[in-house]
Structure formats: structure tokens, C-alpha cells
Image (cartoon, coloured by chain):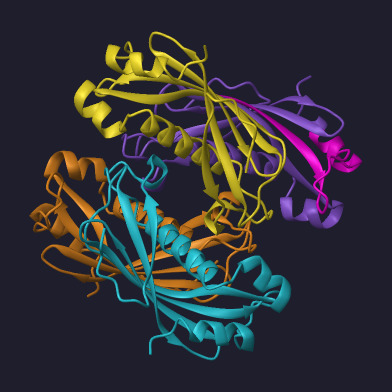
Chain colours: A orange, B cyan, C yellow, D purple
Amino acid sequence: MNLGLAPDTFSFPVRVYYEDTDSGGVVYYANYLKFLERARTEWLRAAGFEQPELLRDHNVIFVVRSVAIEYLRPAQFNDELTVTVRMEKLGRSTIEVFQTVERDAKLVEATVKIVCVDGASFKPVSIPAPIKQQLESLAPA
Amino acid sequence: MNLGLAPDTFSFPVRVYYEDTDSGGVVYYANYLKFLERARTEWLRAAGFEQPELLRDHNVIFVVRSVAIEYLRPAQFNDELTVTVRMEKLGRSTIEVFQTVERDAKLVEATVKIVCVDGASFKPVSIPAPIKQQLESLAPA
Amino acid sequence: MNLGLAPDTFSFPVRVYYEDTDSGGVVYYANYLKFLERARTEWLRAAGFEQPELLRDHNVIFVVRSVAIEYLRPAQFNDELTVTVRMEKLGRSTIEVFQTVERDAKLVEATVKIVCVDGASFKPVSIPAPIKQQLESLAPA
Amino acid sequence: MNLGLAPDTFSFPVRVYYEDTDSGGVVYYANYLKFLERARTEWLRAAGFEQPELLRDHNVIFVVRSVAIEYLRPAQFNDELTVTVRMEKLGRSTIEVFQTVERDAKLVEATVKIVCVDGASFKPVSIPAPIKQQLESLAPA
């Protein structure tokens, strides 16, 4: 499927299983946040980052600070979805990404703000320089 | 615990179990949306609405159209949380609520927009008059 | 509701929310294991044990070693369920409990084996004496 | 990875995300049942069955009747797991499968009994002949 994605947009496939649905017959609204995080994890991995190593080598964790999500159309059991990630802003300690969940049309769109925090205190810290450098390659021109 | 809530604010207790947490040692970010929905369900019940009856008697379902959620402080295993619901706006087919998750301090705050849809087509419809009337009693003065 | 429970049987109420159901219209099979654990957590709490304290004071965690679960009848959205816990066997490092999920009839029954493990190595260890003593008061005569 | 699987054993990869873990630092015990079902869904798909079509064309659903699961070793965040499915018994209306979750070693093993039920009444019915025939090709010699 050609989603006509911009070259700086990462995409990841997600299959809908029974676990994801609710008795309304559609994907339960909280479960899209799981799909969004799976795609962010794979986007970081594709950029060379394994999160357990970020913690071990740099003592940082990326945590979600806010989500603004719109539910446009419902997904259903057995659907093959595509989840996208595009970096919008890269700050000193924050990352903002724009994400979508798509099938034949856009089902969900979300803006997610992530903060780099100390692995022990959970206080915001600057994104370590070597990570920042690599993230810049993902940022919009 | 006196949360100093306004009289038009509904509150509901939630205990954090292992199922709610992740290996970061805190409540997983998507799971707060479950807590928020439990509280909305109990808020509707307290107002006299059982959702299966809304579907059976009026052929409508309330679905979430958007969520804007901010994660301020993390909750942990075994915490006793209070989840609040306050109606912000009541439209022809939409309801907007403001919700928080609290412990000793505010952990999460969220604005949730809900749409009344036809139980079969999932198209937005006017909130049936008898329901609307009762919801107005929950709305801010 | 009088379930005619034996005096050594603990019971805990669980309400079914949308998060628990799937598109088959019933509670998703894995989610009963969440209900079972909530009841075990509350059973331990009623016996005087807070799990974070067990870890802090005795450096032990109780982990599930096996589950044998039978699904007899389905639960649905909005159901009010009762989850029960009864200790069957108390060994040197193991606890075996029998649990049910009930509504008007028995919906689920399960035998769950739990092992006391070291909080760091996850290796089985003897249940610390003061905990064992208190658990014995829960054991069948 | 060569797991030395018998030729009649189906295997499916599962990556562990944050959503799957708990604050004990390992995969939450109920979530393995999600992994097991994802693999069974893909095993049925590989055998030519799409579950929405089974319901539409034959008015049947496969539901889980019982699970006996042993937790041998814990999985952790970011692990790449392999979930296997092997048919053990094929009855008139029942299927019994043996499943494992593996990494470098076996982490979990489970026997799952499935019943074919009427899509409306949820009463057990014979597995429709064309499905039975195809399932026989998956059964042990």
C-alpha cells in the first residue's frame, strides 16, 4: 500500500487481534495508544536506539508528557493497520511527534510530546548529545 | 480525602494493580484512559444511565471523539487514586468533560470529547431528548 | 448477594467495563486473569499484607507459577461479578489457591499456583516465617 | 533461530513492548494469553481461515474453553519471542492445541482447549465439514 508518505515519515504495520477490540465491535480507544507506542519504539529502533541501552548507557528514559488524539473512523478485528511516526519538533529535553493510524483512510491522528528524564529521579534532563545528534537526522528540514 | 472538589464534580476511586503498571515501575500511559472511562461510566450510572439501556431503548452509543491528556506525575502499583469527571459543554450531539486523576496531588488531567452516535451506523445523531434533559442537570450553571 | 461461600472463602466485587470486553461481545479470556489477580491482591491485603512492604521488608515477591482456568459461561459489559479466593495448599515456598468468577452462576473457575521468590534473583525461597504464620490462618483446617 | 520445531508446529514472532510488562520488570502473566491467541489467529490464517469469514459463511466462532499454562521463565521488555502452536487433538466440536513461548529457552507452555460454538447462541456445534477437513491437515499423523 502506497500511503504517499513523506520521506521523513516512518511506518509500521499493526494487525488488530481480539485483545484490541471491545464489545462495541471496534478497537477500544485506549488501545490505539499501544499501537502508537509500538510504532515509536520501532521508529527509535530503526534510528539505532534500543531503549534498554539508552537507560544502561545514558541513564535516560523517554516518557510521554502529553497526547492529543482524534478518533476519526473505527478499526475492527482483523484489520491490517499502518501506524506512522513523523518528528515535528526536537527541543533540549523534548521530542514532539505526529502520528497516524491508517487503513484505507486515516482512522486516528495524534500529537505526542515526549520528555527525556533521568532514569532514577524521573526529572527532565537534556537529551544526551550523541542521541540528540542522531535524532536530528530524523527531524524535519 | 477532601479533594476540595466543586459540587458538580463526580469522583470515583481506582486502585492500581499490577495489570496497570509497566516495567518503568509506573502506570502505563494508555491505562489512564481506562481509568478515565471507568469514572465516566460510573458518572453516567450515578446520573441514572446504564449504557446497555441507552443502546436498547434509544439505539445510541456514546463514543470518544478526542482526548487531550497531560501526564503530570506518575502513579505506581498499589496507589489509591481518585478519578474525577466534570461536564464542560453539552452540545446537540456532543459532550465535553474535564477529568483528572489524583493521589496526594494531580497526576493527570484530560479533556475528553464524546459524540452520541447511532448504534448501528455509528453516525452522529442528536442526543435523545430525555437523556439530554437529564444531562443538563450535570452541566455547569 | 449470598453466594453460600465457605467461611474461609474471600470474595471481591468486579464491575465489567468496555476495556474488559472484546468484539465477540463478552469479556476477553485473558482479562479474567486480571480479575483473579485483583482479588488475590485484596485477599492478601485483607490478611494484612501490602505487596510493596513484602518486597521492602522481606525482599520477596509472589509470582504466578501456573494457572489452570476453565471458562464455563461468558461475562458481558456492565456485569457485576464476584471473584473468590480460597487457599488450597500452603507449602514451604508455594501457595495454591482456588478461585471463581461468579454472577448469577459460576462463570469461571481456576487453580493458581504461586511461588515466593527472591525480589532480585527471582529464585524460589521459603516464605518468610512471619508471613507463613499469618497465611496459615487463611489455610483450610 | 532454529527452534528444532516439528514440521507440524507453527511459529509466530512477538516483540515485547512496554504495554506487555508490569512493574515487576517482566511480562504480566495475563498478557501471555494475548501472545498465545495472536499465534493461534495467525495459525488459522496460515491454514486458510479468516475468523470474520468463519462467522459470516458458517455462523461459527471458536472460543476458548480452558487453558492450562505454566510460567517457566520471565520475558522482559524488548525481548523477541517465538510463539508456537501445534494441534494435539481434533474432536467433533473441539480443538486442543499445545503452545509455547520461547526466547533462548522455553519461557511458557500451555494447553488450550477450543470449542466451536454457534455465532448467535454460543452453544457448542460440530465443526462445519469443510473447516474440519482442512483442520485435519494440521492434525498430528
Residue in the image at 79% along x and 19% along y: D141
Residue in the image at 56% along x and 49% along y: A19
Stretch in magenta? D109-135
Residue A44 visible here: yes
Residue at the limit of the structure toward the top, as seen here: C92
Residue in the image at 63% along x and 57% along y: A77
Q: Is residue B123 left or right of residue A55?
A: right
Q: Quadrant of the C terminus of chain A?
A: bottom left
Q: Quadrant of the N terminus of chain A?
A: bottom right
The quadrant in which residue B78 appears is top left
Q: Can you say whether C13 is above or below D98 in the image?
A: below
Q: Position of residue B21 (x, y in %)?
A: 35, 45
Q: Nearer the viewer, residue B130 or B23?
A: B130
The quadrant in which residue B98 appears is bottom left
Q: Is residue C11 left or right of residue B141?
A: right
Q: Position of residue A104 (x, y in %)?
A: 58, 71
Q: Can you say whether C116 is above or below A99 in the image?
A: above
Residue D70 visible here: no
Q: Can you say whether C72 is above or below A82 in the image?
A: above
Residue in the image at 11% along x and 53% along y: A130
Q: Nearer the viewer, residue D114 or A95?
A: D114
Q: Is residue C136 left or right of residue C14?
A: left
Q: Position of residue D71 (x, y in %)?
A: 47, 24
Residue D77 belongs to the span the image colors magenta:
no
Q: Can you say whether D38 is above or below B140 in the image?
A: above
Q: Position of residue B6 (x, y in %)?
A: 30, 76
Q: Nearer the viewer, residue C104 or C71?
A: C104
Residue D122 belongs to the span the image colors magenta:
yes
